[in-house]
Amino acid sequence: MNEVVLECKNLTKAFNTHSNGSGIRNFFVRKKKMFALKNISFSVRKGEIFGIIGPNGSGKSTLVRIIVNLLIPDSGYCMVKGMDVQKNEIEVRRLMNRVSVEASFFKKLSVMENLLYIGRLYNMKSDETRKRVEEIMKKLVFPVTYLEESVENLSRGMQQKVAVARAFMTQPELLLLDEPTTGLDPVSKRHVQEFIVYVRKRFETTILLCSHDMAEVEKICDRVAIIMKGEFVKVDTPERLKILVRGVENPTMEDVFIQLTGREWEKEVN
């Protein structure tokens, strides 16, 4: 795990706002900058699961969108296997895939039709695609009988399993997971988490996992970055982060968050 697959250096992104504090946009008020990211720097090695935890609005999704080149940073850069994501967009896109909290599908089509479409985009033969779909869905504990079901008829948990399967169809070297288990039932959440660990172990896939699920990140991540208001507060292994907590027996990642930020987690999320 020495090869650096993902490297971000001094990433900063700000958005202009016209708000005067009343909640109403006022175009006669001077524009103010709201920083979504401030000088974010980190690297992820081959086969590593790197977690980023923080409340909603802390900058996690902005970071992912910069990595996949959907947003341009104001300063700094991001590289995948030594290639700049902006200058080498086509080459980089072949190396990674993303799963977001609100995955989109051709919902009138069946699960298999959606995945066959992805296979065709990557010049995979139909038989090869079907075989890979069956292998992935078996690992995700997705019933084979549901493969011919229309996506719109599936539960939220089942749809998210399809999204995860779609992202791994091409066996990407870098998998970006933005809140992949948010809103899932406990069983579906466990299946997705187990699949994440499996692909890392089986294929040495490098994984960036953004979440506000403390237990999830502690359970499956090798290293964790705590992000607050667009800045990394601390980066380390879950075990070393928990050592920082004082006066608490058997501390959790929630205790770590409170220790490092001085703020209650529930208040931040809600």
Image (cartoon, rainbow, N blue to C red):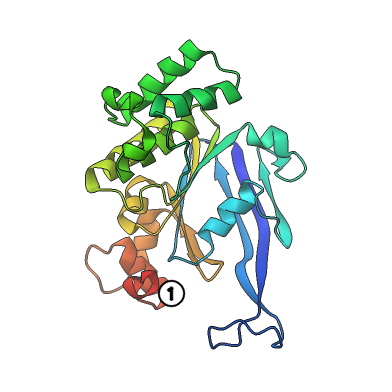
Where, by quadrant of the figure, is residue 268 drawn?
A: bottom left
Relative to residue 260, is residue 151 depicted above or below? above
Find residue 148 and report its horizontal and vertical position in percent.
34, 24
- Is residue 204 visible in the rendered image? The answer is no
Find residue 224 and report its horizontal and vertical position in percent.
44, 55
- Residue farthest to the front, as pictured: 108
Count of numbered marks: 1
Where, by quadrant of the figure, is residue 258 drawn?
A: bottom left
Find residue 64 and report its horizontal and vertical position in percent.
56, 52
Q: Residues within 10 Å of mark 1 (few under 14, many from 20)?
A: some
- Is residue 62 visible in the rendered image? The answer is yes
Q: Left or right of 170: which side holds 265? A: left
Location of mark 1 (residue): 261
Q: Residue at x 36, y 20 (%)?
A: 134
Q: Amino acid at mark 1?
A: Thr
> Which quadrant is the C terminus positioned in?
bottom left
Q: Residue at x 47, y 48 (%)?
A: 100
Find residue 139 and report its horizontal and vertical position in percent.
32, 27
Where, by quadrant of the figure, is residue 93 drawn?
A: top right
Relative to residue 212, is residue 248 depicted above or below? below
- Residue farthest to the right, as pictured: 87
